[in-house]
Amino acid sequence: MNGATPRPATPTHGSRPTLAKVAELAGVSVSTASLAFSGAGPITPETRDRVLAAAAELDYTGPNPLGRQLRSGRSGIVGVVIGDQLKRSFRDPVSVQVLDGLVSTLGENGLGVLLIPGIPSDDPARAVDPLVESAAMDVAVLVWGVSSDDATLTALQRRGVPVVVGEGRAVPGAGLVGIKDREGTAAVVRHLVELGHTRIAEIALSFGTAERTGPIDAARLAQVDRTPTANRLAGVRDAIEPVITWETEASLVEHGKTAGLALLDVPVRERPTALIAHSDLLAAGALLAAHELGLRVPQDVSVAGFDGLDLPWLSPDVLTTVHQPLAEKGAELGRAVIALLAGENPAPVLLDVELVVGSTTGPVPTPAD
Amino acid sequence: MNGATPRPATPTHGSRPTLAKVAELAGVSVSTASLAFSGAGPITPETRDRVLAAAAELDYTGPNPLGRQLRSGRSGIVGVVIGDQLKRSFRDPVSVQVLDGLVSTLGENGLGVLLIPGIPSDDPARAVDPLVESAAMDVAVLVWGVSSDDATLTALQRRGVPVVVGEGRAVPGAGLVGIKDREGTAAVVRHLVELGHTRIAEIALSFGTAERTGPIDAARLAQVDRTPTANRLAGVRDAIEPVITWETEASLVEHGKTAGLALLDVPVRERPTALIAHSDLLAAGALLAAHELGLRVPQDVSVAGFDGLDLPWLSPDVLTTVHQPLAEKGAELGRAVIALLAGENPAPVLLDVELVVGSTTGPVPTPAD
DNA sequence: ACCATGCCTCGAATCGATTCGAAGCCCAGG
DNA sequence: CCTGGGCTTCGAATCGATTCGAGGCATGGT
């Protein structure tokens, strides 16, 4: 019926019905049809029903999100940049629980989460994931902090994408949600000190720059370029100077075990009497190492962690740890995103942590033992 | 300079520069400016440089994805529907590894992953996540199979979104990637039978319908509505009829432990001599249960799993299991997505699995023992 | 010198929806 | 009978980019 279109300048899209077709069938204008779906604006029930009936007849399932997005300038998508490789990030229940809180909070507000892999830290080019450069997103969340010259952060800011940083140092103009890392490790180490420990070894989270494993010296300590790590290191030192600090490449059981074996498999006189790990997974690994070496916990060595995970397979041991509200952190990140979208400037949030004493810490062994 | 625009029909978008502004500054037409960025079509290096320079001056970071997406009809986004709650799905390394393979493969092709929570199975309304109804996506991946009347699948098909199903039954018109579940459990149970076991108990994955825990009867067995579970059940029965089958609500260590305690904490005459679990996490839980009950593995009871995960904390035990190529499954899902986008009709893929015998299975204990 | 051949660049249409002011309609009041 | 007010519906502009054929300009062949 309609005259020949001038030129078909477009590839034959999957010919789904459009709002225009629905409007035509319903005998109304496109703008009225739009009203029938969006509900924004007055419309007679009859008219709406007629439009919806036409839609049903054409198998029209609702406005095409792409059109809506262009018009509104919003994609409804929040980019979530996770630490490094997905595989590794998600093997850590800490990430998962935070993400869970984040996804639910955003979901309740009609926002979807676009997963953006972080950068393999061994990439010399400090390249940025292509999605960071060109994916549509209204806000980005950097879940695991930022380093001082974070290429991803820079790219996002250049694009004008508002950013929320989790567990990071404060970034001007960006939302921030963290926990009291420093107070946390300080509390747990103070607990160990009160039990009489003086030779305390520390198993630290990744330093953020080159992935390394092993004991560190003062020079290396100065290179920390990752916020939660830096804060937890500082907290430990608020209570005591550890006899040795062991750097790990990631917060996983196997790395904790490696560290534990290295730290504990030494003559008893040099052996630390307590291990403080920056994460529960690392602590769990250290615990396994202690068991494997035939050491009794906590009689021979105390072990403490950080996070407050529920690790059923550690049974009957119950880890002494610092509990942090992971899902709540995720929810708080979500709220910061919502606030940013509403044009507000969310205040930084620092959540409380709590020392939870379990069965893996006890009085320092007497030398005579 | 420019005359008054007729009417400002739009909210003041975050006034980022547009391609038109860049073109104006560079003194070229919008179409030429587009060419400078997309590289599709001939353009003089000088012209391109002039456009890029203008872009740099205006802080224009590249074409707005929303505009591009509307024009091309493609969002570059793949919706990934995960089983149920994020928290639970991702506590299972199986999901994570598959997702990792999927994300990398899609990433290499410029596609992003939109995380879509599945439905809390306790939702009586069988509602669908809003994202399923209205988020922009070119393809959707249902990672953990579909049930017979899957509301999410239906909604996606109505929308005309192509679907790839992982681990599911075949769906007409949808891509399919799975593993040889049936052959897998058959192989591991046959291994147990060869070791002399006849009293074999089975710890099964969730049945998909109501979340239940506990022993099942024949009636319940007929209600299985989840493909991997159904196939693994069938595989077991290809080798032997288990003396008892225990249904779990999810594939997590604690559920395996509960099952293990229930199955093993009985008089020795009734006790199964071997446990076959549908997943490594369940098997690990059963193993912990056996240890807790003071049973030696494999002298008193054999335990086998499925998946081939690397579970360092099981040490020194090494689980007998069926290895499945998880990352490869993810990659294969990704390839199916790409194929679908290319207009092809990807053939179903069924990946091989392999029995890997560890230290947790051994000869059936002699009754005299 | 003239015409054919390329190679760039430009204009205009288009993707699918939202939105805002204007227009149309009906009814009540003067 | 005419006019004013309140609702609903409509037209047209707009979001930001891509794409295709047409047009312009310069080069090379005869």
Image (cartoon, coloured by chain):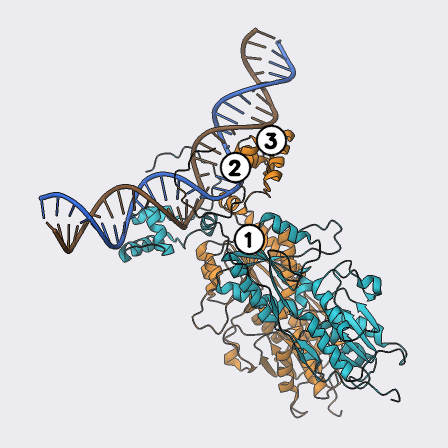
Chain colours: A cyan, B orange, C brown, D blue
Residue pointed to by mark 3: B42
Relative to B271, say whether A319 is above or below: above
Q: Chain of mark 1?
A: A
- The lab-note entry on whether marks 3 and 2 share a chain reads yes
What residue sits 53% from the left and 31% below the top?
A: B29
The residue type indicated by label 2 comes to Ala
Residue pointed to by mark 2: B20
State the mark number for residue A80.
Answer: none
Relative to A269, say whether C29 is above or below: above
Q: Nearer the viewer, residue B23 or D20?
A: B23
Relative to D18, say whether B109 is above or below: below
Relative to B243, say whether A56 is above or below: above
Discs 2/1, front: 2
The residue type indicated by label 3 comes to Pro
Discs 1/3, front: 1
Q: Quadrant of residue A121?
A: bottom right
The residue type indicated by label 1 comes to Met
**Residue B318 can be seen in this image:** no
- The lab-note entry on whether marks 1 and 3 share a chain reads no
Which quadrant of the figure contains the N terminus of chain A? top left
- Which numbered disc, 3 or 2, marks the residue that appears first in the sequence? 2
Residue B18 point in image, percent of width and height = 53, 41
How packed mark 1 is, by other alpha carbons closer than 10 Å (few <14, some 14-19, many 20 or more), is many
Residue A369 point in image, percent of width and height = 87, 89
Distance CA(mark 2)–CA(mark 1)? 21 Å
Residue pointed to by mark 1: A137
Residue A244 point in image, percent of width and height = 83, 71
**Secondary element type, mark 2:** helix
